[in-house]
Image (cartoon, helix red, strand yellow):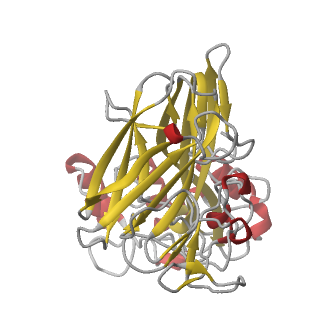
């Protein structure tokens, strides 16, 4: 039996064939052949007369690679690990539960099993030869281990091969070999003039794998602040240690620095600083007592073979998108007794701040005209009156003295 990875595998490797008898070329090195990659006890290497196909004609699935000999590791993963032409060229065979139609990785002793094969490029002349190591002795020598003998031809497309798993089949991770060719009379080893060979791992036992994948999306914002202090005579360090999200704390610090509170204006503009996206995968598993499985659900949860019992795998992919912003505070104002407060409160346009402007301001208080809002808070309050009174007596504003 296989004592190796957990990948439901298929693979191919090339060997050279020549002449009408399709005998192997004496030396390895012909890169035009497709080989298997089961352990060499199944006769896989060129030196063991392993199965090899000239890379032409029908394929199992859509991919076929070529090698000059079977590729290590000889455990059903050699082709993929070596990547000799296709990262996963064993794409032509899957095992199916006959009753439910679901894809399985284990066969149940004493029950019917199904292999669904996909053929391409055979022109209606493709023959399929299939073997399963039921007794776990790491070969395909027994007659009942051949489950398809190539006696019929298949058209391109998907086809089912149904077979009985012996009741006394060994509980194990077993090897399975599938060959497609237009040639008649092929066995589990030896050359073929065309086609492809795929070696798979399959469990034998009443194993159930339940795998669930959840994809979660998380969005979060990170907001920072920065301040631009535009008040002549006030050092920007006055805001050192101040929480810039607390505007009252900013105003208090400015007042302490001698800034006229009626002149303080804080404008806030949010800047988009971009985003980062991270994905984390969390895997949790549960299993019934006595479960036997092969594989690595931490590093390779997609390729588990459950031989006995039930294994449940929950894969949670969490994608976190973090958006970064900066609130930019632009702060202006005047020192107490300094220049004229803005906006300039000459409401009647006579270039001076006087009682006529005061009359208009008072009238504005009754009708809520925003034109008389001197503090920028969208309201007419006592703060606007205070600001006006300071302007009235400020020489810089041309006010009455």
Which one is in front, 271 or 101? Answer: 101
Quadrant of res 114: top left
Vertical placement of 77 versus 70: above or below?
Answer: above
Is 280 above or below relative to 164?
below
Total tally of numbered discs in the picture: 0
Q: Position of residue 60 (x, y in %)?
A: 41, 63
Counting from the top left corner in percent of width and height, residue 92 is at: 42, 58
Q: Is residue 91 left or right of residue 150?
A: right
322 and 59: which is toward the camera:
59
Q: Work out whether residue 168 can be spotted.
A: yes
Q: Residue 274 location in percent, x, y?
A: 54, 68
Image point (72%, 61%), residue name: 258
* Residue at 36% over, 71% down: 58
In this rendering, position of residue 334 left or right of residue 137:
left
Quadrant location of residue 17?
bottom right
Residue 91: x %, y % from top left: 45, 60
Whether residue 336 is visible, yes or no, is no
Q: Quadrant of the N terminus?
A: top right
Residue, far left: 367
Q: Is residue 317 left or right of residue 172?
A: left
> Residue at position x 57%, y 40% from top?
142
Q: In the orientation shown, which residue stands out farthest toward the top?
A: 289
Q: Is residue 172 above or below residue 17?
A: above
**Residue placed at 59% from the left, 31% from the top?**
306
């Amino acid at each position: 039996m296989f004592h190796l990875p957990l990948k439901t595998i298929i693979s191919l490797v090339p060997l050279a064939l020549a002449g009408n008898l399709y005998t192997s070329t004496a030396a390895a090195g012909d890169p035009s052949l497709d080989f298997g990659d089961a352990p060499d006890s199944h006769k896989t290497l060129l030196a063991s007369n392993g199965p090899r196909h000239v890379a032409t004609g029908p394929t199992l699935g859509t991919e076929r690679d070529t090698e000059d000999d079977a590729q290590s590791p000889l455990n059903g993963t050699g082709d993929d690990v070596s990547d000799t032409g296709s990262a996963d060229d064993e794409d032509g065979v899957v095992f199916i539960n006959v009753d439910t139609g679901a894809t399985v990785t284990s066969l149940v002793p004493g029950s019917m099993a199904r292999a669904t094969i996909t053929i391409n490029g055979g022109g209606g002349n493709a023959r399929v030869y299939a073997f399963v190591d039921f007794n776990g002795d790491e070969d395909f020598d027994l007659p009942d281990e051949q489950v398809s003998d190539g006696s019929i031809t298949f058209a391109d497309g998907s086809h089912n091969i149904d077979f009985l798993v012996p009741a006394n089949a060994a509980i194990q991770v077993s090897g399975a070999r599938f060959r497609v060719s237009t040639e008649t009379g092929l066995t589990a080893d030896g050359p073929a003039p065309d086609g492809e060979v795929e070696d798979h791992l399959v469990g034998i036992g009443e194993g159930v794998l339940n795998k669930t994948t959840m994809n979660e999306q998380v969005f979060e914002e990170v907001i920072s602040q920065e301040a631009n202090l535009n008040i002549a005579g006030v050092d920007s360090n006055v805001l050192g240690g101040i929480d810039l999200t607390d505007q009252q704390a900013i105003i208090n610090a400015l007042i302490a620095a001698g800034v006229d509170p009626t002149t303080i204006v804080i404008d806030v503009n949010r800047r988009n600083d971009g985003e980062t996206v991270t994905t984390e995968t969390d895997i949790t598993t549960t299993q019934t007592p006595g479960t036997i499985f092969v594989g690595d659900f931490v590093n390779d949860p997609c390729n588990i073979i459950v031989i006995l019992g039930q294994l449940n795998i929950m894969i949670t992919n969490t994608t976190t998108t973090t958006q970064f912003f900066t609130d930019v505070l632009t702060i202006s104002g005047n020192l107490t007794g300094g220049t004229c407060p803005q906006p300039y409160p000459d409401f009647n346009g006579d270039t001076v701040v006087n009682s006529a402007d005061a009359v208009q301001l008072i009238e504005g208080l009754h009708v809520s005209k925003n034109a008389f809002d001197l503090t920028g808070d969208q309201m007419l309050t006592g703060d606007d009156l205070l600001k006006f009174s300071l302007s009235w007596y400020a020489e810089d504003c041309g006010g009455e003295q």
